Image (cartoon, rainbow, N blue to C red):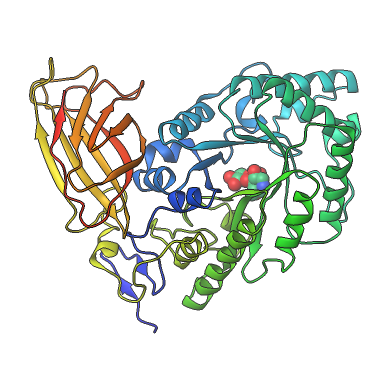
Amino acid sequence: MTALVCTALGAVLLPGAAQAADPPLRDLAAAKGVYIGNAVAGGKLSGNAQYAALAGGQFNSLTPENAMKWGSVEATRGSFNWAEADQIVAFAQAHNQQVRGHTLVWHSQNPSWLTNGGFGATELRGILQQHIATEVGRYQGKIYAWDVLNELFNEDGTFRSSPWYGTLGAGFVADSLTWAHQADPAAKLYINDYNVEGLGTKSDALYNLVRSLKAQGAPIDGVGFQAHFVLGQVPSTLQANLQRFADLGVDVAVTELDVRMQTPATEAKLAQQATDYGTVVKACLAVARCKGVTGWDISDADSWVPDVFSGYGAATLYDQNYQPKPAVRAVVTALGGTVSPSNSPSPTASSSVSPSPGPTATATPTTTATSSPPGGTGCTAVYAVPNQWNTGFSGSVTVSCPTGASLSSWHLDWNFTAGQQLTQAWSGVCSQSGAHVSCANAAWNGAVGPGGSVTLGFNGTWSGGNPAPAVALS
Ligand code: 9MR
């Protein structure tokens, strides 16, 4: 089977590519007791609707790709910029997602005032302690896990040279963990690295460090395996390696997964990539203490790979046009989901490359309720199901006001008449009692200005039928 279906925008839907009607990855992961995450940039969450729809709809964990790094938050000594990090945390909260904080202590992406400062040990130690206390403290209670330490080792297993190691010695590792623990006792504290996914010299060095930290009683909770892989080169010892770390009494996670290939991508390469992604997810699921898998960048249009590895790319789950690649189908399957038929791209899938944000679907139930809440005469609520699969669906209600009307808060009520059950809501607060669903605005999106709109999102289950309910807006 070699036929490709070209859409109006030039996107290519390959045989085996996931369909828009496949269940969201986040629901499947949650059902397996793990999370599925991705790395995000704040500017794209607010500036690219397709990116934001995937980030919010498919993943239940986000990692700021760069926004929490030292060079981002304190480019000038004593002058902090939390804007992008705050934005990502707010987006995650609005979408019922957890956040992996990345990263506090690294040899890279540090501000020049820090790297060129020529600080002695006492001052540098104080600077590091202050940095950790400030950043972890700011997000206390909002970060599921911190990559406290990033990329500590050289390939031969020796400590990498860095301002920290060079001036403070190896003690900065335990000290950093201790300071992070003091600032947020509930956050899981990780050491994160690459080329440590399989058994080997570098992985042994990390293993020995974690073992000694545990023996000292340092607050180490987890080890992150970045997993920046080359096509077809997922280490055969991945699962065994995850397991031996877990056996030390720490959590493990795949934290930055991508699978790069020489471009251009071909059907055969994408099939191998799908196998590779599936292998990684299955390895995580096979290890009880593996908490989740995070991809590194939402789509091939966002990936860091082509900038760093000349001639390589196509490393992520979604293509340049934010369409799912075969690897999405492999992840769905690995997570125990069933996928829609693969070889006959549906109108649903093709239409999902239309300029409107997010997946669209044909023949999905939609209703419009027009009501006259106080002060908001003429405002409407439109119920839609943009995505539906065999037992579940994603729905939305968009509250809009015409010019000349506005709301300072909104409330939605409807009755599911066919036994549908809400499982999750975001950008609003919902509860269901029997058939009755009641939703109120979130703290941050109650105001709907003249000519403006806000959208509540939710997931639900259905069987038999999924008719659109009439929605009352008050
Ligand atoms: O994806 C990140 C890219 O946008 C940055 O320019 C780069 C700077 O070093 O960091 C990339 O993310 C890295 C991550 O923070 C740590 N592990 C390797 C990642 C890819 O380089």
Percent x, y for residue 373? 12, 20
Residue drawn at (48%, 65%) of the image: 333
Q: Nearer the viewer, residue 351 or 362?
A: 362
Seen in the image, is 313 located left or right of residue 467?
right
Seen in the image, is 429 located left or right of residue 59?
left
Q: How many marks?
A: 0
Percent x, y for residue 149? 75, 37
Vertical side of 86 occupied by 60: above or below = below
Q: Nearer the viewer, residue 175 or 462?
A: 462
Q: Nearer the viewer, residue 377 or 157?
A: 377
Q: Examine the rendering and report whether any part of residue 196 can be seen.
A: no
Percent x, y for residue 208? 88, 48
Q: Quadrant of residue 161?
A: top right
Position of the C terminus, as image quadrant, is top left
Q: Examine the rendering and report whether any part of residue 105 can be seen.
A: yes
Residue drawn at (19%, 30%) of the image: 413
Percent x, y for residue 76? 65, 21
Position of the N terminus, as image quadrant, is bottom left
Vertical side of 414 occupied by 407: above or below = above
Name the residue furthest front: 434
Seen in the image, is 199 located left or right of residue 367?
right
Residue drawn at (41%, 31%) of the image: 94
Q: Quadrant of residue 399?
A: top left
Q: Quadrant of residue 155?
A: bottom right
Name the residue furthest bottom: 1
Vertical side of 191 occupied by 269: above or below = below
Vertical side of 359 occupied by 340: above or below = below
